Image (cartoon, coloured by chain):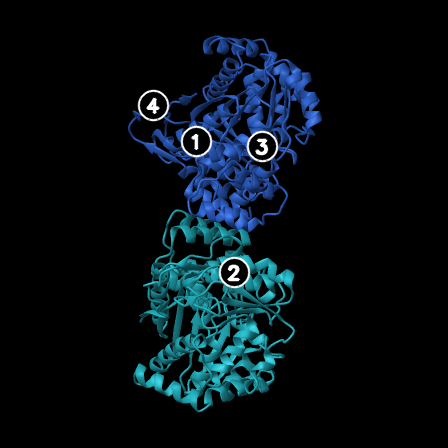
Chain colours: A cyan, B blue
Amino acid sequence: MNPQDLIQKKRDSGRFLPAEIVAFINGVTDKTWADYQISALMMAMFINGLHQSEQNALTEAMLNSGEVLDFSELDASVADKHSTGGVGDKTSLLIAPIAAACGVFVPMISGRGLGHTGGTLDKLESIPNYNVNLSTTEFKKIIKKCGFAMMGQTAEIAPADHKLYALRDATATVESIPLIVASIMSKKLAEGLDALVLDVKTGSGAFMQSEREARKLAKALVKTGNAFNVKTEAVISDMNQPLGKYVGNALEVFECLTILQNETDKQTKQTLDLSIELAARILVLTKTASSSQKAKQKIKDVLASGEALEKFKENILLQGGNPKICDMPELLLDKNLLEVKIKSPESGFILEIDASEIGKAVSLIGGGRIQVDDKIDYAVGYSCDKKLGDKIKEHESLGTLFCRSETQAAKVLAKLQMAYKISLEKPVRKYELVKEIIS
Amino acid sequence: MNPQDLIQKKRDSGRFLPAEIVAFINGVTDKTWADYQISALMMAMFINGLHQSEQNALTEAMLNSGEVLDFSELDASVADKHSTGGVGDKTSLLIAPIAAACGVFVPMISGRGLGHTGGTLDKLESIPNYNVNLSTTEFKKIIKKCGFAMMGQTAEIAPADHKLYALRDATATVESIPLIVASIMSKKLAEGLDALVLDVKTGSGAFMQSEREARKLAKALVKTGNAFNVKTEAVISDMNQPLGKYVGNALEVFECLTILQNETDKQTKQTLDLSIELAARILVLTKTASSSQKAKQKIKDVLASGEALEKFKENILLQGGNPKICDMPELLLDKNLLEVKIKSPESGFILEIDASEIGKAVSLIGGGRIQVDDKIDYAVGYSCDKKLGDKIKEHESLGTLFCRSETQAAKVLAKLQMAYKISLEKPVRKYELVKEIIS
């Protein structure tokens, strides 16, 4: 099976046999396919689509291109949560210690931020000396000790995905449901899970802006997970505004630590609510709790008792960071930052927020990456002072930018102000954080 | 305009503005577009198509990616013929000297053979020391002296096409009419022509096997040529059997020289007839003759008088070859070759010939290229002893293979025999060499 014949088949809308998909992924992994052949086939897949059988075969071939973790020796449930990415989306930092405190093992392999979205690895690296570059042996050892570990994708896990994703990013073939599903699921299935909860974001700060597309993606992810015998559910959650209070790496860890310390306010409660919802589904899927209600009560218990915070502390110690931040989260904050208020140009109610513009603004001042190899300033970020539906007066603060200089602030101030749409009348629209559960 | 945005536009079936096409071709030429981005866009163009305005813009941008020849100083008509490629298709070697003998200048930039088709450059190089690697200055000088010159595509002529063609070949994006048109026309328009005649082949030995596709391609080529103020016509000609008598580089030059010596037989007459048809259209388009009939008479005159042969002799001398072959074409033939007859397994009439199988067989014994960098054995080839509609007896010869060894013959004998379909009854189908003129 030479590359041209396979490319031609999909170009002409043919349906691949599993062996043909395996030949393609082998060619990607052993480098016998040239990059330009891979990208031509991915464009043909993007435009002409993949049947469910092809999507499953692609996921399986990508999964088998690398190492698959095995936790069968643990004699306990292994589960994970994956989000399609958003702005201020920090629930992983709460869900992992919560689930671990409830007795579920969480082998969380995460990614880095790009463009308007943040990445769990970058957030963790805002904790001085926290090490996300673990070998799979170290990863498993830490999970056994404290119930969870967090690391980046290694060269051993789904190497074909690593290659394909970089090419898709450069060739405008990212937003294809079958390709997204194969990319996400090949990595998640490599974690050797019993259960997986997916947080599929929809709205102004999500990759899938429309709810219809988000639902399609969620259904495809759930179908694929279950086809591989991993109990899978998806939550469609709102990303029409940043999640919770802060956007920016150290600020987001700070927000999570205050929540684990049982200190919440109106803004951070949103982060907690979504984390509870997602963690509860993990507990139910792994039969750690017999109902969603019982799961939520269990979660509230491990939060109230400080057990979840204690798990995070253990983990930070094991991954090389300073566990003291769990008692003094303010250690994470840089006091030399300039705080610039984004003032509302008029009085009224907040009708719309372009979350992706807020994410981009934080990236532009160094809090994220515009290009893949950009260096990150972990301290900078943004605080949401008002959110959707809130009443605001002229000149009152919509949000606060934490930045390095006036020049930096000037670059993004207008963009941030324009990210908000103010209405004179109180909006009738309801802002539901969780829109739908797909199981 | 970054590559991703342009790729996305065509991926989503958008229509490019001329400036966007120019940005793409500039990116190809100055190497700021990666090969994988170029191939992704070409796949999107292949599947979603190009509008006529996009095809013209692509042709123009590719043309302007390199040098455009200018013959305005010559004070005479400049014309060329281009064929979409076939088996035994040697008319260029007759049309160039005929047109030159009639007073039309012919700057012929040709290609090499690949797969089942031959290339004019390879045929010329079977003439010992004939040099096809000319600079454009040498090329123009030779044209001024003898009326025509023949060379390969230089790095200066349409360099973007060179790059795109290599990638299309490796990514199954060859058979796209807009991409074929832009590729052919960017090179031909760079010759600075007044008129162009296209020989679009259809049938078992052609790239466009169906007559419907060939007609579509012919129309698109003619439309594009005329849009650039070059008088353009296309002839749709039959490629359901090799053209004329021989397939193989030296053998094809030999066939042309015997024709120029006014020695034709039933098989070689076909080569002559198509050459006259195509050359006559050049004479009419350049107003060298006032009608097709007068053009054909003029051509017959320069053949009968030996003026066309004399032109070829002059050209061979100027391009470094041995002009003696014009008087003794048999000098081209290698007497050490083994001649193996392909015998008919039954008696009847020849109903079908798979010309591409004959072309491939010749390539397989070294007469052409399977891979781009294969070396060529100029002497080997095939002679068509019987053609479509001919009566044949069991064990009578269908054709003769000129090869190096019995082992070589054994590799292709069965394939050659199977390329013929014999019918017991005389076929009613007519074999028209010229199927249609598109102007």
Q: Indicate which disc, 1 or 4, sits on the residue closer to the N terminus.
A: 1
Mark 1 crowdedness (10 Å alpha carbons): few <14, some 14-19, many ≥20: many
For the question of whether residue B189 can be seen, the reply is yes
From the image, tell me which residue sits under label 1. B217
What whole-number distance in Å separates the C-alpha atoms at marks 4 and 3? 40 Å
Q: Is residue A153 above or below residue B337?
A: below
Element at label 4: loop
Is circle 2 on the same chain as circle 1?
no
From the image, tell me which residue sits under label 4. B430
Q: Is residue B110 above or below residue A75?
A: above
What whole-number distance in Å separates the C-alpha atoms at marks 1 and 4? 24 Å
Mark 4 crowdedness (10 Å alpha carbons): few <14, some 14-19, many ≥20: few
The disc numbered 3 marks a residue on which chain? B
The disc numbered 4 marks a residue on which chain? B
Q: Are marks 2 and 1 in contact (CB under 8 Å)?
A: no
From the image, tell me which residue sits under label 3. B63
Residue A416, numbered circle = 2
Element at label 2: helix
Residue B113, numbered circle = none
Please identify, in this view, whether the residue under mark 2 or under mark 4 is nearer the observer. 2
For the question of whether residue A28 can be seen, the reply is no
What whole-number distance in Å separates the C-alpha atoms at marks 2 and 4? 75 Å
What whole-number distance in Å separates the C-alpha atoms at marks 2 and 3? 46 Å
The disc numbered 1 marks a residue on which chain? B
What whole-number distance in Å separates the C-alpha atoms at marks 3 and 1? 19 Å
Amino acid type assigned to the residue bearing label 2 in the image: Leu
The disc numbered 2 marks a residue on which chain? A
Please identify, in this view, whether the residue under mark 1 or under mark 4 is nearer the observer. 1
Amino acid type assigned to the residue bearing label 3 in the image: Leu
Mark 3 crowdedness (10 Å alpha carbons): few <14, some 14-19, many ≥20: many
Q: Quadrant of residue B120?
A: top right
Is circle 4 on the same chain as circle 3?
yes
